[in-house]
Image (cartoon, rainbow, N blue to C red):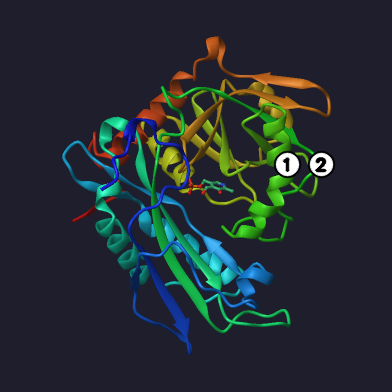
Amino acid sequence: MEKFDWYNLPFGYIKTDYNIRCLYKNGRWGNLETSSSEFIDIHIAATGLHYGQEAFEGLKAYMGRDGKIRLFRWEENAKRMIRSAEGIKMAPVPIDLFGEALFRVIRLNKKFIPPRDSGAALYIRPLLYGSSAEVGVKPAAEYTFLVFVTPVGPYFKGGVKPVNMLICRDVDRAAPQGTGTFKIGGNYAASLRALVAAKNGGYASSIFLDAKEKKYIDECGPANFFGIKENSYITPKSESILKSITNMSLMEIARSVGMKTERRQVPVEELSTFEEAGACGTAAVISPIGKIFDPENNKIYEYCRDDKPGTLTMKLYNKLVAIQYGDEPDEFGWITIVE
Ligand SMILES: Cc1ncc(COP(=O)(O)O)c(C=O)c1O
């Protein structure tokens, strides 16, 4: 077997031994199949290629110090994938089938789950796409569901560090009544111009505003936004952002440690009132925000003194990570042990 430097893993793709596939044909899902190929054979007229009939998910399996493998809130990912599928007229993957595929792919690739000390984890990527041929614009009759895994290093090597973000005013990720709330490839394609521009400018990500009025914060590239002030965790309510499972979980933790939580529209001007701010998602859990730059008025919003993340941000982060790895009891019932 390959020897992994678990402590220096990138946040990228590394080949593992197996992936799982399943086909939807004649109105029903078939059996799960195990494959050791990294490639798929796809029809040249598949709707997944031409009309963006494609949805995906992202979650992690964590190896605890006790040697147990933990999955975090996987049913929420299963439900979100059903919503994404319905949102673009694909056959949804039933929750049980989704779970069975996850457990099987994790067990088969157990040797790729990084040890607790490395801060790394096994990233799991379920994918669903229209696989039968259509030339007119309409939903496919057949679908392919597959799940692959890859070990990923911690997002922040050497500890959590604040990042800078750029407010984006010339690209919209999603239309107000469009598909922004679904986890589908088209939204990511639409975000790339802005993300590349932000990266080229030295920022970790762009912050998208509501597409209609450009008045409110939507989300931070592939992560939700939150601000903290006066012991309150505040996160945008919008019909065009992805409902982050990390964000939902941080809100529950915030309430459990005596903070208030608000999900409501967050006007750009309010950025000047936050004591702490961050981006949250499966990849990094929380990326604390050091500075946000608004190119419209050259305004800079600053959150982290001495380049250190805020105390409440770190309190929420530490608690969530401890639950995910099993360092602390699963008081919210979020963990499934993979036997
Ligand atoms: C657009 C977008 N927003 C937010 C998130 C964070 O969601 P989650 O916490 O479920 O990973 C992601 C990542 O999945 C994303 O792609």
| Left or right: 121, with 232 as reference point | left
| Left or right: 224, with 33 as reference point | right
- Which residue shows up at 46% across the image and 34% down it? 155
- The residue at the far top in this view is 306
Secondary structure under badge 1?
helix
- Which residue shows up at 70% across the image and 39% down it? 196
Q: Earlier in the sequence, mark 2 or mark 1?
A: 2
Q: Quick check: 318 above or below 11?
A: above
To which quarter of the image does residue 195 belong? Answer: top right
Amino acid of disc 2:
Asp
Secondary structure under badge 2?
loop
> 150 or 338, which lies in front?
150
Q: Which residue is mark 2?
A: 170
Rendered image: mark on residue 303: none
Amino acid of disc 1:
Ala
Q: Which residue is mark 1?
A: 194
Q: Quick check: 210 above or below 189?
A: above
Q: Can residue 208 be spotted in the picture?
A: no
Where residue 144 sits in the image (x, y, percent)? 48, 74
Crowdedness near tag 2: few (<14), some (14–19) or many (≥20) residues, C-alpha within 10 Å: few
Q: Are marks 2 and 1 in contact (CB under 8 Å)?
A: yes
* Picture quarter with the C terminus: bottom left
Where residue 79 sits in the image (x, y, percent)? 44, 63
